[in-house]
Image (tube, grey):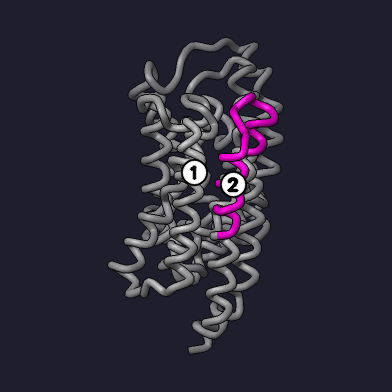
Amino acid sequence: MPRLQEIAHQQGPAAIGLAVGSAFWGLLWVPIRAMEHAGLPGAWPGFVFYCCAVVLMVPILIILKSRPMAHLAVLIPCGLLTGAAFSLYSSSLVLTDVVRAVLLFYLSPIWSTLLGLIFLGERLTPSRIMALVLGLAGLAVIMGGGALSHGANLGDILALLSGILWAFGSFFLFRSGAVAVAEQVFSFVFGAFLVSGVFLLFWGSSFGGAFSGQDLRAAAPWAVITGFIALPMLFLTIWPATILPPARVGLLMMGEIVVGVITAAIWSGDPFGWREATGCLMIASAGFVEVLGHRSRS
C-alpha cells in the first residue's frame, strides 16, 4: 500500500516531466539531420549519438553506485524494446520526412491503450476516450494535408515499428518495479546503441552507407552535444514511464508532434498551414484532457 500511495503521489510531477521531456524530443531531428548533412548517412547518426550517450552514462552509474548487472532480467527487455524503438525512430528521421516520421511514431497511444486494456485491466474512461479521439483526430487533420499522401518508404516503416516497440517498451517499464531510473536510462541508450549496430552490421546497404573519417569528425561535435542534452531528456522520459500507465505515457508524449511539426516547418521547409496548426492544437488538447481527467479521478 505505501508503494501504491507513493506512485499516486508522483504521478502529477511525472506527467509534467514527461510532457517537458517529449517536447525536447521533438527537436531530436535537428542534430540527427545535422550529422547527416555532415556526411553520416542512414542509421549512422543515431549509432554515433547513442555511442556517446552510453559513454556519458558510465560515470553517472559509477557516481550513483548503480548495479545494473543485478537487474538484468528487468533491464534486458526494457532496454532492447525502448532502445530499439528510438534506434528505429532516429533512423526514420533521416530516411523519411520529419513530419511523416513523427506522425507514424505517435500512433503508439493506440498500441499502448490496447496493451493496458489486455494486460493491466485498465478501463476506457471518458477522459481517456476523449484524449485518444482528440489526438488521433489531430493526426488525421495533419495527414489530410498530404503528410502521408504518397507511398510508404523504409523510413515510414521504421517510424511505424518504432511506435509499436515503444508501446511494448513502456509497458515493461511500467512493470519494472523498483529498478533505479539511472539503470533504466543506461539500458535504454545501450539497447539503442546495440540495435543500431546490428542493423548497420547486417543491413548496412539499406540502413547505412559509406562515409569518410572527415565526415565522422565533422559530425562528432553534434553527437557529443546531443548526448549531453539528451540525458536529462531521457531521465524525463524513462522515470515517468515507470510510474504512469503505457497509454497515458503515449498520450502525454504526443506533445512532441507539436514541436516536431512546427520546427520542421521552420527549419526543414516541411509544410505548416492551417491544417498543421489545427492538428497540433488538437493533439496538445489531448494531453491536457488526459492530465485533467486523471486528476479528477484521483
* In the image, residue 280 lies in the stretch drawn in magenta: yes
Tell me which residue sits at (61%, 56%) in the image: 235
Residue picked out by circle 2? 278
Work out whether residue 274 or residue 122 is closer to the camera in this orientation and state it: 274
**Residue 139: image location, x then y, percent:** 48, 46
Q: What residue type is disc 1 on? A: Val
Tell me which residue sits at (50%, 68%) in the image: 244
* Lower position in the chain sequence, tag 2 or tag 1: 1
Q: Find residue 257 and name its label.
A: none
Q: Are marks 2 and 1 in contact (CB under 8 Å)?
A: yes
**Residue 36: image location, x then y, percent:** 58, 21
Crowd class of label 1 (few under 14; some 14 to 19; many from 20; radius 10 Å): many
Q: Quadrant of the C terminus?
A: bottom right
- Residue 140 location, quadrant: top left
Residue picked out by circle 1? 141
Q: What residue type is disc 2 on? A: Thr
Work out whether residue 275 or residue 292 is closer to the camera in this orientation and state it: 275
What secondary structure is found at the residue carrying circle 2? helix
Q: Is residue 135 placed above or below 102 in the rendered structure?
A: below
Find the residue positioned furthest to the front. Answer: 274
* In the image, residue 101 lies in the stretch drawn in magenta: no
Crowd class of label 2 (few under 14; some 14 to 19; many from 20; radius 10 Å): some
**Magenta span:** 262-285
Tell me which residue sits at (41%, 46%) in the image: 163
**Residue 257: image location, x then y, percent:** 56, 45
